Amino acid sequence: MIKAGIIGSTGYAGQELVRLLLGHKEAEIVWYGSRSYIDKRYSDIFGNMFEIVDAKCLEENMERLAEQADVIFTATPQGLCASLVNEEILSRTRMIDLSADFRIKDVATYEKWYGIEHESPEYIQEAVYGLCEINREQIRGKRLIANPGCYTTCSILSLYPLVKEGVIDTDSIIIDAKSGTSGAGRGAKINNLYCEINENIKAYGVTTHRHTPEIEEQLGYACGKQIVLSFTPHLVPMNRGILVTAYGNLTRDYSYEEIRSIYDRYYGKEYFVRVLDRDVLPETRWVEGSNYVDVNFKLDERTKRVVVMGALDNLVKGAAGQAVQNMNLVFGLAETMGLEQVPMFP
Amino acid sequence: MIKAGIIGSTGYAGQELVRLLLGHKEAEIVWYGSRSYIDKRYSDIFGNMFEIVDAKCLEENMERLAEQADVIFTATPQGLCASLVNEEILSRTRMIDLSADFRIKDVATYEKWYGIEHESPEYIQEAVYGLCEINREQIRGKRLIANPGCYTTCSILSLYPLVKEGVIDTDSIIIDAKSGTSGAGRGAKINNLYCEINENIKAYGVTTHRHTPEIEEQLGYACGKQIVLSFTPHLVPMNRGILVTAYGNLTRDYSYEEIRSIYDRYYGKEYFVRVLDRDVLPETRWVEGSNYVDVNFKLDERTKRVVVMGALDNLVKGAAGQAVQNMNLVFGLAETMGLEQVPMFP
Amino acid sequence: MIKAGIIGSTGYAGQELVRLLLGHKEAEIVWYGSRSYIDKRYSDIFGNMFEIVDAKCLEENMERLAEQADVIFTATPQGLCASLVNEEILSRTRMIDLSADFRIKDVATYEKWYGIEHESPEYIQEAVYGLCEINREQIRGKRLIANPGCYTTCSILSLYPLVKEGVIDTDSIIIDAKSGTSGAGRGAKINNLYCEINENIKAYGVTTHRHTPEIEEQLGYACGKQIVLSFTPHLVPMNRGILVTAYGNLTRDYSYEEIRSIYDRYYGKEYFVRVLDRDVLPETRWVEGSNYVDVNFKLDERTKRVVVMGALDNLVKGAAGQAVQNMNLVFGLAETMGLEQVPMFP
Amino acid sequence: MIKAGIIGSTGYAGQELVRLLLGHKEAEIVWYGSRSYIDKRYSDIFGNMFEIVDAKCLEENMERLAEQADVIFTATPQGLCASLVNEEILSRTRMIDLSADFRIKDVATYEKWYGIEHESPEYIQEAVYGLCEINREQIRGKRLIANPGCYTTCSILSLYPLVKEGVIDTDSIIIDAKSGTSGAGRGAKINNLYCEINENIKAYGVTTHRHTPEIEEQLGYACGKQIVLSFTPHLVPMNRGILVTAYGNLTRDYSYEEIRSIYDRYYGKEYFVRVLDRDVLPETRWVEGSNYVDVNFKLDERTKRVVVMGALDNLVKGAAGQAVQNMNLVFGLAETMGLEQVPMFP
């Protein structure tokens, strides 16, 4: 059994990680870390865990945790993981960081977009970007995994085959993304109150959202050159789900079959990426509670563009599910272990 | 492997049954029955099943199904199961009926409240009322199970210990219940459109709802006399969940500890019934997607009443989950098999 | 023009008062009081007011306000109004208090249920309970009005005719109420975050909610004796609306027509109380944004009970709308002035 | 008093028109037309109208209606208005058509996108496109007004100044729009059931939505050349509201102030168009229930694009409100009459 510790277990992503690990037959949770709820029973915070989890929340003591855990998940605000990681810890345990600290290879880019100093840049190169479908082989056995962001996972997986194959002009990419509200976290903020979110849709972080450079970097690797793109997130009155609608100018005329065959080639054997049937568009309701990403595209002959769409559950494939998928890869388990949930509808 | 057929697999309860059976290691679905979608691919109707279920919908031919299935689930409108069942079918297979056809022992009561003639009253006595926590032993090995209603499961499990132990005056019982909208079914009705349900709460079926006699009958067995009670359902703008708030006059003074010990005695060893800690009230969000029922009570010294509350997921413990629990009992499997899902939040 | 000042203008009830007063042709707002947003532009807090309200928020200085305003609305937490009111203020202006400070005539009851000391009990007798349909004549011209609570307005108006006419046994009254989330206020609390409220229903304050003694007192006046009743509020995932479902044992056999004629006698000429047609049940969607209360009842011959239902918008008739109605009565204006909004659907 | 008749009064837009006209001091409704509810009391269909509207629904007899009404609103499916209009009717009354029949000047384009034959193309040239802020002068006194679509109103008003002033490359325009569910109409369709819409977001009509040519035509007039653009609508789980996020490549470097001054020049004096403060982004909650359109933009120096956003209530400025605004212009009334509602929040 893999002993897992969670730093930040009382946020939405942390709690989802608990849900998934409880159903994972090769893992057990040994540490429910929390800054706000130390010594409080975990099931007093999350009533769904009543009579399922008996543990109390523990402080976020990385050293002690490294002694007890085979893997540490950090589902914490930006900067925390980078401030805690060190050689001693990494020599004892594996780390899967759900924050952005080790996702961006260029420190200056990280510091500019996140507005904080990176406290352990020496580990950035070692860290593997844990987008499993793309970096599967590099992830196996590694000790430090940068788990991708929710918007980025959905954006990259939707666009990756077309960018890599040169189907779209990379100067023309526009990503318009929509997210459920669990992505905004569990902090007590007026802006996230029920009555402020319900019956509303808004864009936010327009031109400045921090997932932008992460998407640009990864898609840049795909095509071998620097990409600058537009990314606009929106907040939708629902709990879970991300939908990405992305636009790109075609580099030449393409038939439906040509592009379809590209997607099939990249994702035909992927368990978690479902390329939908022609004219069936991704919807977040069909992936809720699961690790699937549904993708599809529409060609627009009038505008010579392709519209690419992707849908995932931001707490699963966009956070905790992908973290478990990374754990499976790191420890040499079946990649889908503990992640076979059928999406729950309605 | 138990071969399972589903009549009515394209309603919300039927689809939930599919979700649960797909995760059940001793069962496989051999028949996706549907009146409306014959020959249509199941995953074209429910996109969550894409690349998971490859089957097409089949007609609702009970004879052919009885040849192929070890168990038939009927998730159909009232009257259908009663019109199809016969000795030939019951001699070949088991039936778990999610409709109300075999729940009520008195045919006249059934016909009065449901407004239809019962077409196979000869099987009513044989049918076992499948409220597993109460009728567990009678269910084992039987061939015809009447799966309880969603409101009734929640109402009965919440009140049962107090009624059986004579804690409350059975003439005084008032049940005020609230349900998510999946309970209203998947029919194309204006009343169930998003804009009609959203931002609204209403009572319906006041004094006339069909779950009333079912609750009265079962609670009557508990106390050994006929009960007449008030039951009022409400429709809440959410997908899943039932909350029951029930009121009863105490037959004498009771302390918290006395009543608590009764609940512990009845449910202390029950896997799916969680008696919450003192002053923690049931909420539907904590049971969503799971087979749990959360119950608790508050004593009111001012009014000499006890307020009993229960919460469950209407599609799981209130329908498909309990049906699987019944299947497990019928076939001698572990009662919790395939039903260990941790509730999903948020 | 009546000059109106609002203490607590940045809560949901305060903001609704602003919306209503902006449409009132005989009133103007001269003071947008706020503890949290002093000097901040009101429309920076509530974007709906952009280019409509130009004012900034002012401190909650009751003395200065009393010099400038003909009427002061206090939409503040319990205890604040009682701590500020004095003879000097009341000699200069009128006060309509949306908090509970002057609703309950017995100080001990107030202090017990609210857990705070009443700082100006000398004004309790003078204060008029501003349930306009019942105390209309006493309200006219008065200087201190206790604006009723949201649950209480709905509960009392629904039950009043039956209690006053002796139709129901007052020992048997059970009120099961459901409210939208704006009733929980605009404070930054985890419990009121979108993801905590959405897809959930729960009871709260069971046996202890503070509106209980207010309902008991007012219904007690109706029948001339002390009443003890059960009141249970629930939180529903919607922005606005309260639905009350109340139960009472009939004191004798009654026909539909008898009870109907009682409701008609009491409310037939009331502009804001709509007694619905037979078998049409109140729903919150039909009163949203308006000052209407919809009421109706169902007789239950089986249980010898009557089920009474009422629906209103908690921010309008349950708070700001009734406050404006009280203002109209106090100043001798047409009672419906500024309150003729047609309910907005969907 | 202007006598108004409504064809299609029992859809969501028709009902909103009733709500607005009831509050209009110079108009009265003389005809509640409905195909589905003839002879049924209007308030039996829409409970919000109880004791407010006493009328019954009438057949959709355009000839009889033309005799009685000064203006006819047609809130009906595409093709109906075009099939009914004739010289006799237009000589007696004015028509404001909320369908698309007279919006598109090129019959072939209409027939291609809508898939139906236009039955009265002879009136297309006469019809004025009723986007009041742009075509105000042409609307006055006319007898046939094509009321714009909801998405189109929001899209055009957001982009118009930049297209007209040549700020953006018109070949680069991408409009990503999001709508509440009332825009999907009140038909009994499974796809619009509560449980299908709730907790979901999806794109639909990708590359094929019928509002595309309408936007292209009107923006084409602005810049004097043909425009081809991408338009993608999405369905959001909320009742009302449209948010448009539009992207365009800048034709040269622009400062914030330059673009701001353009918006101010076009909309500074417009009552219903609110250009928000710098960095304040439009949100649908701030316009709900009102005729306002909130617009703003963000410059993106990295991508040399401008992101333009607009928000409106699809039933008001996107349908019934603009129809009333057109009526006011046609009859020479104050343009804002009956449309001064403060947006309702929450």
Image (cartoon, coloured by chain):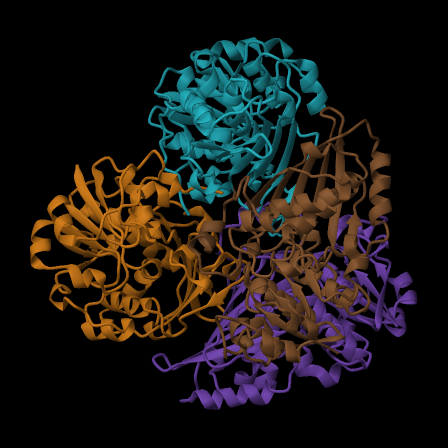
Chain colours: A orange, B cyan, C brown, D purple
Examine the rendering and report whether any part of residue A72 can be seen: yes
**Above or below, A306 relative to C169:** below
Residue B160 appears left or right of C65: left
Q: Nearer the viewer, residue D80 or D147?
A: D147
Residue A206 spot, x, y in % from top left: 41, 73
Residue B135 spot, x, y in % from top left: 47, 15
Q: Quadrant of residue D205?
A: bottom right
Q: Nearer the viewer, residue B180 or C297?
A: C297
**Above or below, A303 relative to B10:** below
**Above or below, A41 relative to C64:** above
Q: Residue at x 46, y 68 (%)?
A: A203
Residue A335 spot, x, y in % from top left: 23, 43
Residue D22 spot, x, y in % from top left: 79, 65
Examine the rendering and report whether any part of residue B189 can be seen: no
Residue C23 appears left or right of C213: right
Counting the numbered discs, the total is 0
**Above or below, B207 relative to B167:** below
Residue B328 appears left or right of C209: left
Q: Residue at x 56, y 27 (%)?
A: B152
The N terminus of chain A appears in which quarter of the rendering?
top left
Q: Nearer the viewer, residue C325 or D345?
A: C325
Residue A251 appears left or right of B99: left
Toward the front, the furthest residue is C122
Q: Nearer the viewer, residue A99 or D3?
A: A99
Q: Residue at x 58, y 62 (%)?
A: C82
